[in-house]
Image (tube, helix red, strand yellow):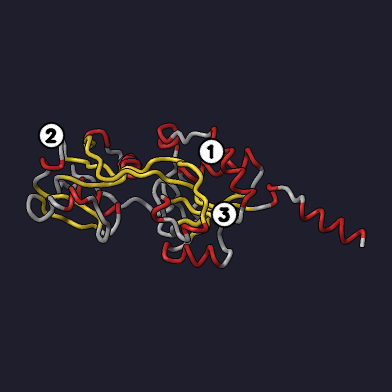
Amino acid sequence: MRIGLLIIAAFWFLPVSSQTLQIMGSDQGFLPFYYGNNLDKGILVEVINEFTMETGIEAGFRPMARKRHAWALEEGLANAVFANPRWMPLPDRMHPVGPILTWRDRVFAQPGQQPDAFDDLRGSICLRRWFVYSDRLERRIGADLVRLDGYNAQQMLGMFLRKRCDYIVMNEIEFRFLARMVEVDSDRYSTELIDAEWPVYLGILKAETALIEAAEAFFATHRVDVEAMLPELPPPDRPISLQPFK
């Protein structure tokens, strides 16, 4: 009986470091936030590595198709995800920690075209197929803007760099990362127009109280320095297939 109580007590006081933060990531990659064949590179990967070093809690990314995120949480295959609360799987069962960083979809323009407002956009624009953009941008499409779709960010950016379109809307950090991979100066194309902006949180299942407490304490003082990380990020496992316009 006494031995049984000791075993129960050992499990009751099991340290938080024995638990694992299992973060789902899209298996298509999320440049440059997490990517690589095993989602072992990127800005958020570096942040989570620092979290592990400071807390002793094992953590890692699990490649997972977005449509399977809710299923993975329910089956216990994962317990966390980076997302905005609006798009978080199982939102009623998740606790958002953060915000960790801010996602911005910026309008980039060919050199010499610097629009001051969305009403100034005329010509052609490269966008991503099936993505939803802001109403103010959607109103311009068809009347003042010809839309050219790409299936992914690399295809979109390749079209833009070949000057097939006057504008492109992309996450600003992703644009800068991909441009650096092909030795293009992203500052030449940046504008002040932001199409969408939203905070990114680390969502953890509410049942994981110890992990939540550790993450809250870590991110209360930790700031994600994207500017410092971006130049040091390694290239993706898959080659960047962009051929800039010469």
Nearer to us: label 3 or label 1? 3
- Residue 49 position within the rendered picture, expressed as x and y whole percent measured from the top left: 56, 43
Q: Is mark 1 on a helix, strand or loop?
A: helix
| Foreground residue among 230 and 121 | 121
Instruction: Please name the amino acid that badge 2 sits on.
Output: Gly
For the residue marked with disc 1, what is the amino acid? Phe
First reached walking from the N terminus: tag 1 or tag 2: 2
Pointers 1 and 2 in contact (CB under 8 A)? no
Circle nearer the N terminus (3, 2): 2
At horizontal 31% and vertical 41% (from top left) the residue drawn is 172
Compute the Cα span from label 3 to label 1: 17 Å
Residue at coordinates 91% horizontally, 59% vertically from top-left? Answer: 3
Q: State the image coordinates of residue 174 (x, y, percent, origin top left).
A: 34, 45
Q: Distance between the residues labelled 3 and 2?
A: 50 Å
How dense is the environment of label 1, judged by Cα within 10 Å: few (below 14), some, or many (20 and up)? some
Which label sits in the foreground, 1 or 2? 1
In this view of the protein, can residue 178 be seen by the observer?
A: no
Q: Which residue lies furthest to the right in this view?
A: 2
Residue 223, visible in the rendered structure: yes
Q: How many neighbours does mark 3 have within 10 angstroms: few (below 14), some (14-19), or many (20 or more)? A: some
Q: Which residue is drawn at 56% across and 57% down?
A: 79
Q: Residue 157: x and y, percent?
A: 25, 49
In the rendered structure, are the residues bearing label 3 and label 2 in contact, judged by CB atoms less than 8 Å apart? no
Residue 113: x and y in percent read 13, 37
Per the image, the residue denoted by label 2 is 112
Mark-to-mark CA distance, 1 and 2:
41 Å
**Residue lying at the far front of the rendered structure:** 92
- Label 2 neighbourhood size at 10 Å, few (<14), some (14-19), many (20+)? few
Report which residue position mark 3 lands on.
206
Residue at the spot of label 1: 219
Compared with 69, 10 (above or below) is: above
